[in-house]
Amino acid sequence: MPTQAKGSILTRLTIMNMLVSSVALLLACVSFFAYDQITFRQSLVRTLSAQAQIIASNSVSAIVFNDPQSASNTLAALSSSQNISSAGILMLDGRPFAQYSTEAGNPIVTLPDMPRGEVEVHQFRSTHLILVRQILSQGKPVGLVYLRADLKELDQRLRRYAFIAISVLLLSLLAAMLISSAFRKRVAQPIIQLAETAQEVSRKKDYSLRAAATGQDDELAVLVDSFNEMLKEIQNRDRDLQKAHNELEERVTERTRDLVSANRELEAFSYSVSHDLRGPLDALEGFSYLLLKQYGAGLDDQGRELIQQIRASGKRMAELIDDLLNLSRVTTSIMHKAKVDLSAIAREITAELCRSAPHRQVEFILPEDEDVYGDAHLLRIVMENLLRNAWKYTSHHQQARIEFGHQRGDGGNVYFLKDDGSGFDPRSAARLFQPFQRLHSSAEFPSNGIGLATVRRIIQRHGGEVWAEGDIEKGATFFFTLP
Amino acid sequence: MRSLLGKTQSALACLLWAFSLVALLTGSYSQAQEQRPTESQVESAYLYNFGKFVTWPADHAAGVGLFEICVIGKDPFGDMLDATVNGETMNGKKIAIRRISSLPQAAECEVLFISQSEQGRLSTILDTAQRFDLLTVSNIKHFAEHGGIIGLVEQQDRIRFEVNRTAALRSHLILSSELLKVAVKVIEKGGPGS
């Protein structure tokens, strides 16, 4: 959603600005404060050390002439230093000689050990700094002076710095917010608009939309320009594609129209040719019959034989015309698909074949129930062609074996019809299914070369395929599939 | 307080050894009753310490590599004074104790302690001492009043001292303000010879 995208990019920009400024500021504050703490501590130690030196040199006489009062007076001058809460002068053996304290009573002070060879030592504790210095007279220690300074000021500084840091942090966060809102127009707005345009384009699929220019000369402007350029390119290609598509469609329609009319013409032609051919043929048949019947007695055996040959040729031609009409019909007839039992059809045909030549010894192997889905009339033509083919090409053998069945293939059942007849030259397998192509001489096996072409047409109309395997004198197997 | 003492003592053990006597002498606490220094112990220490707060003329006793504390008359300190200054130095000079009987012997001394036995010829001694730029110290009563520079007095059971600044100036001695600070009395009038 555009609103979500708008919120997220702006928020992220603002947070980034704030984070960067906060981190920078915090680092600056921390380092400055650390530096200040160190220098302040150093200067505190220096100040205390100077005061201790003054007190040490001013209390030598008090110590050597045993005048605690004088030492106390010296210490009392510390009242002008507000951060010193207590101070004292001790004898070398640790006995107190004089003391000073801003608090009531003398606080018990534990002094740090003086390292060997040093005249001064200081120690920072949680609430105060203690500095101890030897009081020297003629280079020899005669006593100790200690000063205890409160670190309240340090705490105060810490608090003051924390307050300043937090104030500046808040101010800078506010400033970061203001700045990022000012930059919203310059940076985020074009991105948001671009995102919105992109979404609109993908939603409406309208490539004529364009992202608004930012009016600036930066990467965003390049992005917007590139985006628009891309849209333009898509639009152009879309148009070209549409144009090509339209042209193609037009061409397809045109070709289809041409094809349909050509086909129709061809069909009409072949039908009329076949039909018209039958007329003279019928006349030829009729008249040759009459000739034989009425004048046959007047002719010698050779004449009658010639007439018989004319009649046989006429019959062959009639069959040829029937086959041609059939081929034309299987191509154009309307299919009525239903469940068809191929084995039942095969049994009927084989029975008929056996009746036509009872002397032949042919073994038929037919399965029970071979149900397929297709046009019963057309599939009967297929089975008839294939079985008659097998019957025909096994006719030169004493004994023959013809098997129909199916096997599992890639795309479903593959049906086959196998015989052990004359077979064919596998190099010519492709020509088998072309109309008017014959691999055997007409004298050897009478054929018009249309049967397998018809089979192929029918199987193809059912969406299946047909092919053959075989070799010379090794039989042939025809396969077909039915989806 | 015990822990404080223990700590400080352990840290300064080596120094304490050398300066225990000074510490003892300057201590004034009643708890240290059994260690309370005797009068002569305190006076010995004072005699040694005065030198630290006094500046002598640059040409005084030049060429003598010693800082001499001279005692004229009957010595009231016995071994105490020698023990106090034993091994000590003053402004880089070794401190030496010399007991003298005649005034000319005092010419190269820095500090001259005048015993009570010399009360009779005090003014003579002071005159000479002034000529020699000596720091005169004595426990003779009203010593500072009479033109001596530092007079030891007993006050509230403690040995203290009075200072005569004029006498010191006359002997060309500069007394440190530190010294004047702890003096019970600073006298600004001339003694004999003024």
Image: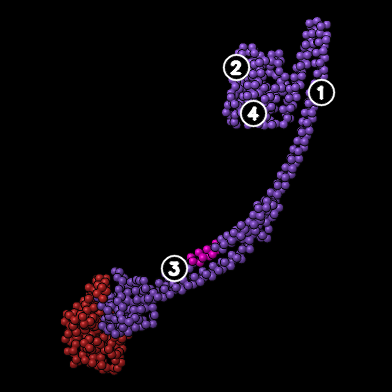
Chain colours: A purple, B red
The quadrant in which the C terminus of chain A is found is top right
Asked if badge 4 and badge 3 are on a common chain, one would say yes
The label nearer to you, 2 versus 4, is 4
Report, in whole angstroms, how far the alpha carbon at label 1 lies from the one at label 4: 35 Å
Q: Which of pointers 2 and 4 lies earlier in the amino acid sequence?
A: 4
Q: Which element carries disc 2, helix, strand or loop?
A: strand
Locate residue B18, reporting x and y percent: 23, 74
Q: Residue at x 81, y 10 (%)?
A: A293
Q: Are marks 1 and 3 in contact (CB under 8 Å)?
A: no
Asked if badge 2 and badge 4 are on a common chain, one would say yes
Q: Residues within 10 Å of mark 2 (few under 14, many from 20)?
A: few
Asked if badge 1 and badge 3 are on a common chain, one would say yes
The label nearer to you, 1 versus 4, is 4
Q: Residues within 10 Å of mark 3 (few under 14, many from 20)?
A: few
What residue did someone put label 3 on? A34
Question: Which label is found at residue B78?
Answer: none
Task: Give the left or right position of residue A133, taking residue B46 as reference.
Answer: right
Question: Which label is found at residue A340?
Answer: 4
User: Residue reaching furthest top?
Assistant: A300
Q: Residue at x 64, y 57 (%)?
A: A196
The label nearer to you, 4 versus 3, is 4
The quadrant in which the N terminus of chain A is found is bottom right
Q: Which of pointers 3 and 2 lies earlier in the amino acid sequence?
A: 3
Q: Residue at x 22, y 73 (%)?
A: B17
Locate residue B193, reporting x and y percent: 27, 94
Task: Give the left or right position of residue A288, taking residue B170 as reference.
Answer: right
Q: Which of pointers 4 and 3 lies earlier in the amino acid sequence?
A: 3
Q: Which of pointers 1 and 4 lies earlier in the amino acid sequence?
A: 1
